[in-house]
Image (tube, rainbow, N blue to C red):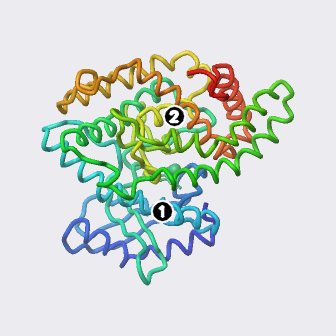
Amino acid sequence: MADTTCREELQSIISIDRVSTWLEKHFRRSVSVIKLKYEDPPVETADYVLSDIVAVNVTVENEGAEVNLIVKLLPNDPFSRYFVTEAQFDLREIKFYNEVVPDLLQFQKENNSVIDLPIPQCFYSEYNVEGSELESVLVLENLKHRGFRSISFATGLTLMQCQVALEAISRVHALSLVMKYKHNLNLDEKYPFLFKTPKATDSYQQLVERGLPQLAAFLEDKPDLENILSSLQELRRRTKDTIAELLRPQDPLGLITHTDFWCNNLLFNEDSTQCMILDWQMISYSRATNDIALLLVSSLPSELRREHTQALLNHYWQYLTHYSASLGLSIEEKLKYDRNQLGVDFRKSLLLALLLCIGSVDVALGSPDTEQRLVDVLQDLYDQGVLSGTSE
Ligand SMILES: Nc1ncnc2c1ncn2[C@@H]1O[C@H](COP(=O)(O)OP(=O)(O)O)[C@@H](O)[C@H]1O
Ligand SMILES: [Mg+2]
């Protein structure tokens, strides 16, 4: 996250001239920017490491309301910057807004569908801006000004927020799935920038290798968790294969997944009846249950996860099948895939979700609530045989 000096530097880069150019391209007319106001801090949470964020409120001549923008830039910190550019996280998100979203919207229109995409509007983007100090830039509407807020990772999601988030992602899943079948597309070929298994596997493994020693040190103080620790050490040997296997899309339900679907990448309106999904840097052609499992494992308090997992899967399934049917595809009849199969795939996805949590274990360590949530997940997955991979 940017410190104050960095932030001032960033703000000076985002000049009136630059913002005017962005808005002119977006509105396709000349735009006279009168004033810029930077929000400080740009966002409430400090948990972002894979980008630098600037929030700027733009006053435009002859325009009634301010235009409120979020500008997402490469992280300043050299390690994070290398990690992002090496694995093309920035490119992937920019391409999501420029290629995937227009295709999904076009498909939605062709089908007279009312399935909205739960994402912010994109005003401007540029990848590797040549001769500029920016390199990559993504300019989005600031959803805070439409009443959307993040929730605290330590508190986790309420049951209702989890339902609303699953309904939101089911729209992206359904649109991409039905578009794939109706237009007979190979999504990996059509969108070559999607997180490909070999690249994704490397990135994930780097994260797991970094997180596992931290987790091991944390577990060592807890003698009753010894079995879990040795299962994790065993899992380490299989990390790469496990990730590669689980990230592969599995027909018939291979579709576009968010793949970093946890509560810090979500915003909710005030009464939590609507959810917006941010941070599409890991978008993949993968399996639907990867998104569901990560959300439940990372962001749902243990009591809710233990009590409501099956009901939440039902909830997701109901929306996925409903939206797909409204676009003309019956998943059960045409694809021969049912709720039971979803449960089987979900179980497999739990392991991938756990590896991702281990990869970013530092967000959980240090706070009693999130440490306990992590221990509960480890304990439950161990008890269910998911950690050892002993039962199907
Ligand atoms: N369009 C937006 N509107 C409002 N807040 C946003 C928007 N985009 C990002 N944010 C805030 O910035 C944080 C970091 O953004 P995100 O895209 O997740 O970046 P990172 O890749 O660094 O995690 C989000 O958790 C959210 O609080
Ligand atoms: Mg994020």
For the point 47% across and 74% down, which residue is it? 134
Q: In which quarter of the image is the C terminus?
A: top right
Q: Does the residue labelled 1 lie within 8 Å of ligand 1?
A: no
Residue 333, position in %: x, y? 23, 21
Position above or below: 355 against 16: above
For marks 1 and 2, the one nearer the N-term is 1
Which element carries disc 2, helix, strand or loop? helix
Identified at 82% across, 29% down, the residue is: 226
Q: Left of 164 or right of it: where is 372?
A: right
The residue at label 2 has a CB less than 8 Å from ligand 2 = no
Say what secondary structure mark 1 lies in: loop
- Real-space Cα distance between discs 1 and 2? 23 Å
Q: Name the front one of labels 1 and 2.
A: 1
Residue of label 1:
88
Residue on which the image places disc 2: 295
Image quadrant where residue 289 sits: top left
As shown in the figure, which amino acid type bears the numbered disc 2?
Answer: Leu
Where does the image place residue 195, in percent across and percent down from the top left?
A: 45, 53
The label shown at residue 366 is none
Q: What percent of the width, then of the height, locates residue 52?
A: 54, 63
Toward which corner of the image does residue 254 lie, by quadrant? top left
Residue found at the very far bottom of the displayed protein:
131
The quarter of the rendered structure image containing the N terminus is bottom right
Observer-nearest residue: 131 or 72?
A: 131
Left or right: residue 59 compared with residue 53: left
Disc 1 to disc 2: CB gap under 8 Å: no
Q: Is residue 353 left or right of residue 95?
A: right
How packed mark 1 is, by other alpha carbons closer than 10 Å (few <14, some 14-19, many 20 or more), is some
